[in-house]
Amino acid sequence: MTHYSQPLEFTGLTRWFDSALRSVMPDFWAIFIELVIVGIALLATYAVIAMILIYVERKITAFFQARIGPNRVGKYGIFQTVADVLKILIKEIIHVNKVDKFLFYAAPFFIIVASMLTFGAIPFGKGLQAVDFNIGVFYVTAVSSLGIIGVLLAGWSSNNKYSMIGAMRSGAQFVSYELSGGFALMTIVVLTGTMQLSGMVETQRYCWNLFNGHIASFVAFIIYLISGHAETNRGPFDLPEAESELTAGYHTEYSGLQFGFFYLAEYLNMFVIAAIAATVFLGGWMPIQIKGWDAFNQIMWYIPSYVWFFGKTGVLIFISLWVRWSFPRLRIDQLLNLEWKYLLPINLVNILLMVILVLSGLTLTQIF
Amino acid sequence: MSNLSAFLAVFLTGIVLVVAGLGMAILLSPKSFNPQKGEPYECGIPTHGTSWMQFKAGYYLYAILYLMFDVEAVFLFPWATIVRELGVNGLYSILFFLLILALGLAYAWRKGVLKWK
C-alpha cells in the first residue's frame, strides 16, 4: 500500500480556498459562493467540451471520408465552432403556429437539464466532482432518462409528422437500450460493491474494473458501449433523425438556439456516456498500475488525474466516432431485435456470471 | 458542501443555461413576420390533417416490456451492492427472481411481441 506524490492536483487549491472563505465569512455564504463557482465552472466546461467535440467530430469525420473538413476559420479551422455558435445565436427563433406552445418551449429545458445533471456527477479528477451521491450509478441512469421526456415532448408538441415519428422511434430506442446500459453498469456494481462513483474509482486503484472482472467485465463493457451509443441516437442507431427519411426527426420544427440546445445536448450526452464508461470500467482518473513496477507506477502518478480522465474519455469518444462512420444505419426492427433478443438475455446471464466470479473469488486484484 | 445543495446548484445551472441562452438569442436575433413561416415543415408541401393522432401500437408494447424490466432493475441495484455479504443464498434467491422475469420475456417473445409488423 504505497502512496505516491501527486504534484499537479487541484485538491490543495480547493481546500485552501474553502478554508480561506470560511475564515472571512459565515459558513452559509462560503458554501453559497462555492456553489456559484461550481455552477460557473460546470457551465464553462460544458460549453467548452461541446465546442471542442463538435470541431473534433467534424474533423475526424472528414478524415474518415477522405475530406479535409472545416479549414477556413482560423488555422486548421479551429475557430469554426466559435463562428457556428455566434451564427446560431443571431438566428431568428421562429414561432410555429400550430405547436403546443408550453410543451414546445419546455422540451429544451428537459434535455439540457438532464445532460447537465449527469455531467455534474462525473468525477473529472481527484476531488473534481460536483455531485457525489452514494447511489451514483443509479442516479446517472435515472437522471439521463429525463432527456427522453424532452425528446418525446419536442416530437409530440411540434405537430409535425416527421417530428412525431422521430420522437416515437427515439423513445422506443432509448427505453430499450437504457435497460442494457443499466444492467451493464449493474454488473460492475456487483463487482465493486458500491454505487458511489468516487467509491468505484477508488476500488480501481490497483486494477481497473475491466481487468478486475475479466470475462464478465469485458462483456459488460462492450454492451455498455453499444447501448450508450444507441442512447445518444448516433452512428448506426441514428434512426430518430435519419435525415434522408425524417428530415431532422424530433427537432425538425426547432430553429435558432432552440435547435442549438438539442445539438449541444447530443454532443454532451456522447461525452457523458464515454465518461461514465471510462469511470466505471477503465478506472476513471486512476492511472494504470502494474504490480512490482514501482518506478513506472510513480511516473504514472505524476501525470495529473484529469489528464488520465480526459485521455480515457477521448479514446472512447474516438471509438464511438469510428463506429459511427463504419456501419450503415440499422432498420427499426433490427435495432429492437438486437436489444431485446440478444443484448438483454446476454446481460442477464452476464450478471449471474459476475456474481459467480465474485463469490468464488476468481476476480483479479492486480495486473499480473 | 452537501450533495443535495450541489445537486440543486447543478440543476439551476442547467436552467440558467437555457434561460440565458434563449434570452441572448431573442435579444440578438432578427424578427420578421410571414404567415408561411408558421406552417409545419413538410418539404414544402402543405400538411394534411393533424399530427396528433393514434400511433403504431408496436412502440407501446416495447414500452410495457421496458416497464417490467426497469422495475426489476430497481430491485436488482440494492441487491447488487450487497451481493458479497449475501453470499450464495443471495445468488439462489435472485436466480428465482430472474427466472420469473426471463419467463416473462420468453412469453412475450413467444407471443410475437418482439416481432416488428
Image: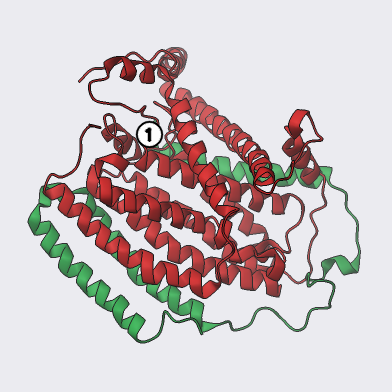
Chain colours: A red, B green
Q: Residue A28, image x and y in percent?
A: 44, 26
Horizontal and vertical percent position of residue B76: 25, 59
- Which residue lies most toward the front here? A66
| Quarter of the image that includes the N terminus of chain A | top left
User: Which amino acid is tagged 1?
Assistant: Ser
Nearest to the observer: residue A138 or residue A231: A231
Residue A159 visible to the viewer: no
What is the total number of numbered labels drawn onto the structure image?
A: 1
Foreground pick, A211 / B50:
A211
Q: Dot 1: within a 10 Å radius of its alpha carbon, few (fewer than 14), some, or many (20 or more) residues? A: few
Q: Chain of mark 1?
A: B
Q: Nearer the viewer, residue A234 or B43?
A: A234
Q: Nearer the viewer, residue B88 or B67?
A: B88
Q: Is residue B53 above or below residue A190?
A: below
Q: Quadrant of residue A192?
A: top left
- Describe residue A290's horizontal placement relative to residue A157 as left or right: left
Quick one: SS at disc 1? loop
> Is residue A31 found left or right of B52 in the rendered image?
left
A168 w.r.t. A257: above or below: below
Q: Is residue A168 above or below residue B16?
A: below
A296 relative position to A18: left or right: left
On the question of residue A3 being in view, the answer is yes
Q: Quadrant of residue A58?
A: top right
- The residue under the point 62% across, 34% down is A48
Residue beneath the point at 26% across and 73% down: B102
The residue wearing badge 1 is B2
Quarter of the image with the C terminus of chain A is top left
x, y (%) of residue A321? 57, 48
Residue at point 59%, 64% (across, down): A329
Q: Is residue A262 left or right of residue A212?
A: right
Farthest residue to the bottom: give it: B111
How far across and how far down the image is residue A135, in percent?
Answer: 32, 46
